[in-house]
Amino acid sequence: MTSRPLLLIVLLATFTAAIFIVELTTGPSSIDFSNVFMNLINPEDIDQNGPNSGALNAGSTSVGLGLDSIIFLEIRLPRALLAVSIGATLGLAGAALQGLLRNPLAGPGLMGVSNCAALGAVIALYFGWSGVSIYAVPIAGMTGAALSVLMIFLLAGQNSSIMTLLLAGVAVNAVASSLISLALNLAPNPYAMSEMVFWLLGSIANRSMSDFYLALPFMLVGWLLILTSGRFLNALSLGEDTAQSLGFHLGRERGIIISGVALSVGAAVSVSGNVGFVGLLVPHLLRPLVGHEPGRLLLASALGGALLVLLADVAVQSFTPGHELKLGVVTALVGGPFFLYLIIKTRNSLI
Amino acid sequence: MKLQAKNIELKFDGNSVLKNISIAIDKNELVGLIGPNGAGKTSLLRVLANLQKYDSGELLLNEQAINSINRKQLAKHISYLAQGAPAHWPLEVYRLVALGRLPYLNPWSNLSAEDNAVIAQAMALAEIEHLSGRIVSTLSGGERLRVLIARMFATQSNIILADEPIAALDPYHQLHTMELLREHCDRGGSSVVVLHDLNMAARFCHRLVLIDQGNIAFEGKPDCVLQTENIAQVYGIETQILHTESGMTIIPKSRTSN
Amino acid sequence: MLKTALKTTALFHPYSVLFALLLSAPLTYGTVVNYNKPVRIVSTNLCTDQLLLMLVGKDRIASITNLAKQPEYSYLWEKAQDIPTNVGLAEEILPLQPDLILTTEFSPGNATAILMNNKLPVEIVALPDSFAGLEALISRLGELLGEQEAAAGLITSMRADIDSAKVRIKNVDISNRPTALIYSPNGHTAGSNTFKNTIVTMAGYSNIATDLGIEYYSNLSVEQVLLSKPDLVIVSESDYNRDSLAHRYTDHPALLKWQGHHGMLTIPDNQWLCVGPMSTEALKTIAGTHK
């Protein structure tokens, strides 16, 4: 009885690890991993010609060693780590929101959480707050995310009929997207306008380890808060009154989940922009495999989300190496039709 | 275990819902809360379950103020079955009953052998062992209710509070449910049940509390409380009451003309 | 006109001629200014703004584009600060009653047509794509603005700069040039058929972007830049206002770590965004990187 969900977790973890390795080896060109490995265990001073000496650079073997390592450690590794952590965040947040709102159509994208996080990040980045503190952008992202979850809760609240929930999500999303466009239009930086696509579609290309380190502590705390709420989400399936009678403090538990979602999604989106549909798709697919238990769904969704984003990012890099597609485009291409299918399947119960 | 409410006052938006209500439940007692719609039965039950804040009064468990008892501890003593018997996700029956053990678990532990034994026994008591692997959303109303009762048995709580548990059930399952609750009280537990069905209330409850507009109108044994004058006064209906060897029967005749 | 006036004067004594000349000087000077030297000049293009600012004093400029004040785009942004600006609308320009309007064939809307309909002197400039074309334009503007000397001076100093660059690259083996790659915010690079490419080539480098088949402009990821192993990465950007994602390409740690050791140079984009005399600064800087 308890072995099936465990088997699922093990399978997901194995696949995720495998695709993680594939992601590390995907890129515009192949790098020599034996070089990288040797460089890691035997670090060499790659400063051959001195700083900014300019021109001549013979392609010697020791130089080749350094280059592959740099590409691996500074470009490929952060990209793969971000794919895993952002995917895990979105999957986890989707499962948490669906459990909290007792509705399979909740998710950070549909509910506007990601867009509000992006709005916060956009304001902080383009109006120069990141000059005050490097944490300004992720903190603004988290604030945006928190506000949106609160708003959804206020709008849809206890009842959370599907209609109300979706409408609340549409409203929040519409407001957030238009405010993002407005902020970018008003921003003093000339490049701001051209970056709209990134914020609304998401990407993890050309990130660095510092981006990862910046978001990581917030994501970790968020994950922890959500994962400890598994029992509460299970109790919630019997209704709010029963959950309370089983010993849970309703306000506090909700606050923990909301904080967890805000922290993790806010930080993730501030680095990657809005990657859609992962939070909706992954818990939905995995729910039958964990017996519909919200608590069990959490860890499975985290792994499933990581796996999905890794696959999408590998696809992004493999199919159009010249013109790189945005990550959000790929997840939308998979998630959009799935969402339509969901609507058709549950059409009768949707009023 | 003794659950006691003293002088409870409750107002919603300025309207008085419960006016100075005092009620006590002790072991081996199956207490029926009856009364017209909107009388305040559900509100009183929720106050007793510590789910509803009241404006003044006291709520005590074994002479100790409930406010001072840790939530999880309280959960081990009092169980609540909400109106409509909600079970939101299509869980497996065993897993749903297992939710009853939540007050005994911390976030990271799994179900122990002891937990599983308790669950098994709860399912036996509720007579749902044969439904163990089924999905709860595929069950009939009566079966589902027994699953939720099994959940409460799994919590091993002394006091069970149920809000209109038999409202949507067929007569077979109505009897079965009330029998289970009665057996629980016979075993040393106690229960407060909100009921509309006066016949079932008369048949199974040790004591009835008849509530009218936030006040306790009549309280006592079923045959004391269920008198035609009392019913006429509170419900506004003329009834005929028969005493048969199966028990009391209350037959509604007509609405009283005022 | 002057000669005719002199001939009709009865008193032909040199002093009286001189006196007449002095008296008439303001008149004739005023006439010459109105005809040869415009004093209310409007420019509706960033690149003509630059040339205008180099050739005439601020007091003769009625309006330049708003881009001229922004350091990201304009080399002479400081000089442009107190000058009124326009966004190229006929509505803004008409009230200024300009006596010369410099515009290009790519001006937005049909402002040019409206201005010409209002009988205003419009000069449609074809922006050059080479130093030779630039020299021709500078000469033409010198004529139009009545600043032939200043124009000639600009051309002379440009030629001197180009010559000094040629000196610096005289030791470079033309058949085996070192490679360079231009990298800008958002990962933009310039390939063949661009002025930046011309400068890089004149500075003794071979532009990797052309080898990669890039015509005009395109994007490269940081990894692609590193894998092409350029001897020199030329980061073309302004230092001001780095609050955007665009800078994560040019600021990427991988790029800084690798190329920091192997050749990285920053050229302010405003030097070679427009084809102008300031572009020789870029040429000299890049040419100066050879050993």
Image: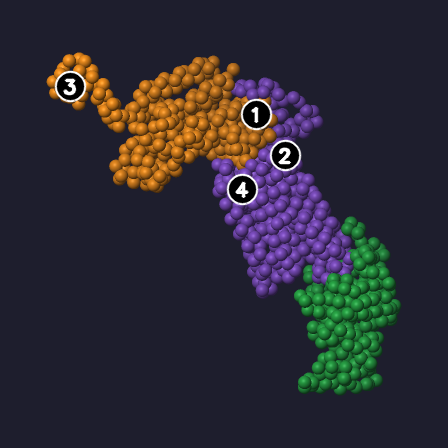
Chain colours: A purple, B green, C orange
The amino acid on which the numbered mark 3 sits, given as a three-letter code, is: Leu
Find residue A332 and report its horizontal and vertical position in percent. 55, 49
| Amino acid tagged 1 | Gln
- The reply to the same-chain question for discs 4 and 1 is no
Question: Does A143 appear above or below C73?
Answer: below
Task: Indicate the secondary structure of the residue bearing disc 1.
Answer: helix
Mark 1–mark 3 Cα distance, whole angstroms, equals: 73 Å
State the residue position of label 1: C259
Q: Residue at x 78, y 70 (%)?
A: B21
Q: Earlier in the sequence, mark 2 or mark 4?
A: 4
Badge count: 4
- As measured in the structure, the alpha-carbon distance from the residue carrying label 2 to the one carrying label 1 is 19 Å
Type of amino acid at the residue the image marks with label 2: Ser
Quarter of the image for residue B70 reads: bottom right
Residue at figure coordinates x 59%, y 19% from the top left: A50
**Residue bearing mark 2:** A210
Tell me if I can see residue B109 in this picture. yes
At label 2, counting other C-alpha atoms closer than 10 Å, the crowd grade (few under 14, some 14-19, many 20 or more) is: few
**Which disc number belongs to residue C6?**
3
Quarter where residue A61 is shown: top right
Q: Report whether mark 2 lies on the same chain as mark 3.
A: no
